[in-house]
Amino acid sequence: MKGLLVALLWAVSALALPDECLEELKFGNCTEPNPRKTRYGYNKFTGGCIAYTESECGPTRNKFETREQCEQKCAPDRCSKPLEKGPCAGNLKRYGYDTVTKKCREFTYSGCGGNNNMFETIEECREVCNDSFVEDICALPITAGPCRAQITRYAYDGEQKKCVAFNYGGCRGNENNFQTLASCISRCMRQGAEPTTPETGDRCSLPIDAGPCLAMIPRYAYMSRLGKCVAFTYGGCQGNANNFETQQDCEDSCQNPTSSSKPEDVCSLPVLSGPCRARLLRFTYDKTTKSCVAFYYGGCGGNANNFETLKDCKATCQKPDASVCTQPINVGPCDSLIQRYAYDLTKRSCVPFYYGGCQGNGNNFETRDVCASTCEKQTISVNAKDTCSQPIDLGSCGAQIPRYAYDSTAQKCVPFFYGGCQGNTNNFASKGECVSMCSTSANPEPTEDVCQQDIDRGACTLNMERYAYDKNKKQCLAFTYGGCKGNENNFATMEECTAKCVPQSTGKDICSQPIEPGPCRGSYRRYAYDATSGKCILFAYGGCQGNDNNFLRKNECEQMCLGGEGSEDPCKLPLKAGNCSNFQYRWGYRDGYCVQFLYSGCNGNANNFEALNDCINTCGTYLQYY
């Protein structure tokens, strides 16, 4: 009934629209050599005009040179319509123009129905509806608010007549508060002289910013860490000046011999805090000490020798030390899946691995080329005898990273806490690695079964969700790890724990098990084989116990229980919106990129991901760049 009501609401609103506004948008997914152009078209599902990349596949009249032309033709009275919640039960934050107060304001949208007086951001509402309040917010004082967060925001300073950074407390304050410098400049520096284009060096050192809008416009930007121009998908609004229509424009601006954004020039620039008074922790290369050091950035001015993370600074300015190539491959204790490269001493080559996102060691490179240039072209002359005869060295830093080293006096591998830097190669991520390298075959050291170790939270006070095997219950359970010490019965995922400690069932046994959410109260998207329907279906897993009929991805379930039937590579499937009316934004793979599209809620396919990271993790091998 609700779906019928939504359809009727849409049909009634569509009757008044010109025919061309209802024609299907032709997105740029063709292979003709013609350059793709950015156009604007009316989206009949959202009731507004959107930017999109024009296709040469077929004609359409729903195509306009500018957003203004599209709005004038297809949504001329958009801002005069009442704010409508709609008949569904959702609770979505949206913005609309209030004809009584003549201002854009927030309202709650149910998720269906309603009308096109509805915008994702208040800025978009103000731009379309000519909200006179736009210019008033720039005259408001800069207000941090009463809360104590330290969130970097930007505001217009009337005395300095420019946008400056400030620390927002996280609550209250006022609307002279922008998430990016570009959005502040766009709103508050339009009158009078337009803001000057950043100098080339500053422009090229800006981070790549797709902006908050949902268009899919191919653009190029300079990445100082790689020293080259790369492709990215621009959303169509906001972003920053590191945004070029062609690769040639980007290279001409940022990769010419005089560009100050080239890594060697950036690193020779002096340390500059800038004239503003924010205290933003940044990193800069000190050519005197030949190392990256922390400093406080004022929030404006300065130069390109300014990095948000120590890792970015080192990657750009510090030549990697070949000694890192002898360190063991260490994924670290966190549970992200970031593809990196490391030098494998046994294979004498660089190999891919998945980094957890924290800790680890220096044998960790973003690209294979950097790894190879650092390690494969060096003479790595470290053998087991050299490594295992070295004394245990904690290093000079103050971290407490659990490691193992070979004690030549006791003739066994022992635990110790590594400080995080320097030290030597008698340093192993696990006892097993140490035993493998240093225990002689004539006198092998017994390896303790990690699955029989007690679950140990450790001594630190972090709250990290990890998994361990409970030898009494004979199953893997979630537990809270403090972040240091503990023991090796500690896994990043339930799958790793199960693979190590739980005897593997056969595929037939797994698929015959009932769907079991488990007793915990989490809500994790998992897939299980339903014997009644003969299909792999989605269910909510509580986070603990359950059984083996529990898969992270649908194609894994189909591979195990259907013999691969229906388990085609989702990245090779077309984007499919389906034919229902519960519209929602999803991510899918197309033409070398993970892009956002509008999914109707049913009859799609596996090329459909709730989050950008899910798309990247699944289709990463096909991506041109992310």
Image (cartoon, helix red, strand yellow):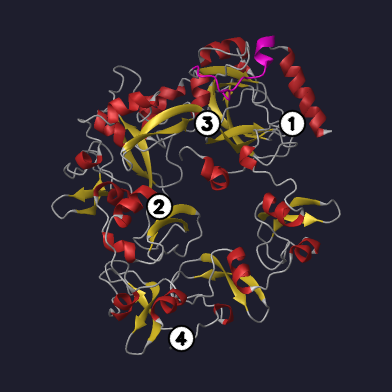
The residue identified by callout 4 is 445
**Residue 323, how many percent across, how many down?**
28, 63
Q: Which amino acid does label 3 sit on?
A: Thr
Is residue 277 part of the magenta span, yes or no? no
Mark closer to the chain start, 3 or 2: 3
Eye-nearest disc, 4 or 1: 4
Q: Closer to us: mark 3 or mark 4?
A: 4
Separation of marks 1 and 2 at Cα, in angstroms: 43 Å
User: What distance separates the C-alpha of mark 4 from that of mark 2?
Assistant: 53 Å
Q: Mark 2 points at which residue?
A: 148
> In 3D space, how far apart are the residues under numbered discs 4 and 1 (Cα atoms)?
64 Å
Q: Residue at x 64, y 42 (%)?
A: 570
- Side of 356 where 1 appears, left or right: right
Q: Residue furthest right?
A: 532
Pointer 4 with pointer 2, Cβ within 8 A: no
Q: What residue type is labelled 1?
A: Ser
Look at the numbered disc 1 and give the secondary structure of its residue. loop
Boundaries of the magenta span: 19-34
Can residue 514 be spotted in the picture?
Answer: no
**Pointer 1 residue:** 581
Q: Which of 311 and 376 is in front in this view?
A: 376
Numbered mark located on residue 121 in the image: 3
- Badge 4 marks a residue whose secondary structure is loop
Above/below status of 352 relative to 211: below
